[in-house]
Image (cartoon, coloured by chain):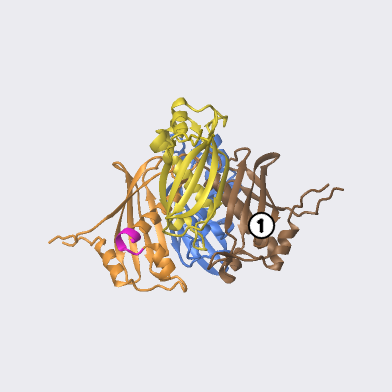
Chain colours: A brown, B yellow, C blue, D orange
Amino acid sequence: MMWRRAMTVYRHSIEVMFQHCDPAGIVFYPRFFDMANEVTERFFADVVGWPFRDMHGVDRRGIPSASARLDFRAPARLGDRLDWEMHVGRLGRTSATLVYHAGCGTMAVLSGEVVIVHADLDGVRPLPWRDDVRAVLAAHQQAPVAS
Amino acid sequence: MMWRRAMTVYRHSIEVMFQHCDPAGIVFYPRFFDMANEVTERFFADVVGWPFRDMHGVDRRGIPSASARLDFRAPARLGDRLDWEMHVGRLGRTSATLVYHAGCGTMAVLSGEVVIVHADLDGVRPLPWRDDVRAVLAAHQQAPVAS
Amino acid sequence: MMWRRAMTVYRHSIEVMFQHCDPAGIVFYPRFFDMANEVTERFFADVVGWPFRDMHGVDRRGIPSASARLDFRAPARLGDRLDWEMHVGRLGRTSATLVYHAGCGTMAVLSGEVVIVHADLDGVRPLPWRDDVRAVLAAHQQAPVAS
Amino acid sequence: MMWRRAMTVYRHSIEVMFQHCDPAGIVFYPRFFDMANEVTERFFADVVGWPFRDMHGVDRRGIPSASARLDFRAPARLGDRLDWEMHVGRLGRTSATLVYHAGCGTMAVLSGEVVIVHADLDGVRPLPWRDDVRAVLAAHQQAPVAS
């Protein structure tokens, strides 16, 4: 038997701007990590309902990264519209693996993942996800395919 | 029999400045990739003898990244002096894996690697390393331990 | 007699994101210049019809800045929506003064101006504006008040 | 009678790196403000003896900018060594005008000024300079020429 849990993918488009590009005329690769963070920030504001402003300023929580990896398939250029997709891979008690794909038209540009940890800003200690946050993350989780 | 090829590690220190830090008071993780790029840029200028200025402007070559990954062990804070080390892992015909470690005092802050590809800037086609560049990369390569 | 030429103001909103903010939790002031550049870039793409991609990549033209100044009235914080307004002040043969105001709700955040020069990318020589570009810039120019 | 108070100018060199440059191959102008901030940050750490780390983290003080202006004389390119000079212009009770010049070899690249305000980080209220900080700022102040 094969099944796949219904998954909601979060989508956000980012246009490649002047400030993203290097003297070679393509996106300077650290800027792709800035973009990945922007996707995450929008997701927390628009979908989770926990904008960074409240997370940091009010609740004194943060989601620092434990690791970050991107594989680049094709260069992106000034003016390209990058369509980012994000879903949740592994969902831990205090962490989550965010999986990203970005493309331009039909061309794959990159894929990768960032492991975030829910932490106390003041002590930088990991903390369990709040139930409402976990529920939204779980709704965006891609389940393994079983047979 | 066990042997290990003599390896030269490249070292470069970077102080965490205001512009690297986020509202949580720690380095915003995409800035670590900026720093990794700075280490690479210095290495090419100071050790390889092929500064980016000549590479891009004169020779129309570049070293775009095929993939980039960093694992973060501990947060770095404003004013921390990060001691970066870089060596070459796999050395291909047109690519190289640059391996990074950074610490602050005795504390490990991060480790990871970036795969760079030697490419024609105009066509973004991979090109074999020039012999003199390959020789320097090879001198910084860590050989596998054999028994 | 008093008159004022009909002026079109260009408007573009930018939300303050994590990457704009410093350890003090407010926008790091150089990021406001990044935002001003974003407003200009959008204006050239959406209104002038000459996106930077074509300007730089196809036509080998650019609009480097001769000077840039911003006066800050109030700090902007993570999550603030900044409403930017831009119009053209002085319009020269090869240059233009872009005048910016940004606010958050009813609060003024900043005002200032950037002088851009239309230039040949290869020689960095000033060049007269193309007629169609000049026409759009002129349509956004605020005329002096005469009596 | 003509006199000029002995002035100490602070000097700091910054090499133009890949991350500073735009697709036109020259420094993207907002990065010059990042550099000006770096000069100021080094000055406070190395000369004033009040590094931003202590200023922000321990004392909960900051020096946000009230205004920032740079005039660009010549483009700076990848690999250029920019020699920055900074002195204090007007020194107020709670503010200071920092005056910058940067050149590359014998060529002037830019000049301008940033007005900083000594402020309470928590309330963003202006506060009088501490005596020891004011003394160092005053020692770097350029006096008007009288006759």
| Residue under the image location 36 percent in, 58 percent down | D40
Residue B74, percent from left and from top: 51, 57
| Residue B140 x/y as whole percent | 45, 36
Residue in the picture at 44% in, 62% down: C71
Query: Would residue A92 be found to the left or right of residue B143 on screen?
Result: right
Residue D83 x %, y %: 32, 47
Task: Please tell me how crowded label 1 is: few (under 14), some (14-19), or many (20+) other residues with Cα within 10 Å.
Answer: many
Magenta segment main secondary structure: helix
Q: Is the C terminus of chain C in the top left, top right, bottom left or bottom right quadrant?
A: bottom left
Tell me which corner region of the image, top left, top right, bottom left or bottom right, holds residue A106. top right
Task: Name the side, left or right, on which A110 lies relative to B53.
Answer: right
Where does the image place residue D96, in percent across and percent down from the top left? 33, 65
Residue B57 seen by the camera: yes
Asked if A71 appears above or below A122 in the picture, the reply is above
The residue at 60%/55% (across/down) is A38
Query: To which residue does mark 1 refer?
Result: A96
Subunit ID for the residue under disc 1: A
User: Taking D31 as reference, is B120 left or right?
Assistant: right
The residues colored magenta run D44-50
Helix, strand or loop at label 1? It is: strand
